[in-house]
Image: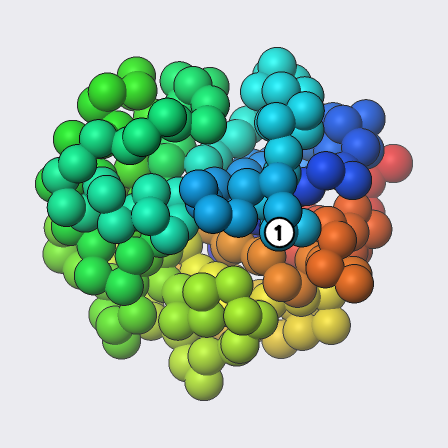
């Protein structure tokens, strides 16, 4: 079974809007944008205001990935100070935290339209909670591949798999994940970067490996 879509996380200042539009026309893709109050605009993975403006008005399928002090504030039930963008434009909002609280994610999400919440898990099984979409990710953007992937929890749930996936190992990863009988997506960050810049060529290679070449 193929993934419903692939999330490529970390589009940045150097990402050409034309390139990601063109790839989105051929494959089911969600583009993940990283947010952190300390890293925005200074860390290559966290785009600055000009790049964010381009992406916000692109009409692409987007997910917001909130890190650092943003995720801490959400888990503590506090409002974000000066949110960098209007999260209304995102279909999903992921809060990157080692100890996620789904109810806090839902509360935050409710203030920004109908975006679906995403929480990370490092457990060997997906949590029973269904109020958010759970992403299995022990790597946290470090490009580390797990020794095993948790089984799909069953039913119509949508769950995600991340951790060290790249064009070099995508065939091996998919040989395992395609055995699942439930809905899932895969997420990549470090594996689709070159010299810490987002690499659309690597994204294209992954899409072709998963879904086949598209003319």
Residue extending furthest bottom?
A: 147
In terms of image quadrants, where is residue 189? bottom right
Looking at the image, which residue is at 40% across and 49% down? 67
Residue at the disc numbered 1: 43
Q: Mark 1 packing: few (<14 Cα in 10 Å), some, or many (20+)?
A: few
Looking at the image, which residue is at 16% across and 31% down? 107
Q: Is residue 5 above or below residue 169?
A: above
- Position of 12 with respect to 185 (left or right) is right
Residue 35 in view: yes
Q: Quadrant of the C terminus?
A: top right
Q: Position of residue 178 (x, y in %)?
A: 51, 63
Looking at the image, which residue is at 27% across and 63% down? 98
- Position of 34 with respect to 136 (left or right) is right
In terms of image quadrants, where is residue 55? top right
Q: Position of residue 155 (x, y in %)?
A: 23, 49
Model colouring: rainbow
Q: Is residue 55 above or below residue 13?
A: above
Looking at the image, which residue is at 39% across and 43% down? 66
* Image label count: 1
Q: Position of residue 115 (x, y in %)?
A: 34, 26
Question: As rendered, which of 65 and 213 lies closer to the eye?
Answer: 65
Residue 55 in view: no
In terms of image quadrants, where is residue 172? bottom right
Question: As rendered, which of 12 and 152 lies closer to the eye?
Answer: 12
Q: Is residue 178 above or below residue 19?
A: below
Q: Position of residue 65 (x, y in %)?
A: 44, 43
- Position of 172 with respect to 91 (left or right) is right
Secondary structure category for the residue under label 1: loop
Q: Is residue 122 above or below residue 87?
A: below
Question: As rendered, which of 57 and 158 lies closer to the eye?
Answer: 57
């Amino acid at each position: 079974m193929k993934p419903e879509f692939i999330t490529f996380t970390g589009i940045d200042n150097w990402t050409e809007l034309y390139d990601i539009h063109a790839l989105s026309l051929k494959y089911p893709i969600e583009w993940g944008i990283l947010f952190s109050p300390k890293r925005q605009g200074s860390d290559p993975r966290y785009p600055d205001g000009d790049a964010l403006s381009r992406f916000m008005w692109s009409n692409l399928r987007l997910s917001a990935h909130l890190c650092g002090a943003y995720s801490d504030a959400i888990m503590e039930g506090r409002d974000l100070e000066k949110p960098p963008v209007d999260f209304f434009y995102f279909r999903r909002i992921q809060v990157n935290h080692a100890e996620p609280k789904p109810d806090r994610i839902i509360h935050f999400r409710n203030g920004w339209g109908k975006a679906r919440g995403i929480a990370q898990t490092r457990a060997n099984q997906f949590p029973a909670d269904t109020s958010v979409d759970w992403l299995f990710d022990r790597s946290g953007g470090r490009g580390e591949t797990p020794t095993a992937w948790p089984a799909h929890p069953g039913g119509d749930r949508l769950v995600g798999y991340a951790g060290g996936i790249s064009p070099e190992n995508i065939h091996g990863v998919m040989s395992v994940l395609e055995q699942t009988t439930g809905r899932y997506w895969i997420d990549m960050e470090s594996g689709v970067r070159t010299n810490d810049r987002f690499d659309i060529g690597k994204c294209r290679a992954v899409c072709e490996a998963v879904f086949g070449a598209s003319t």
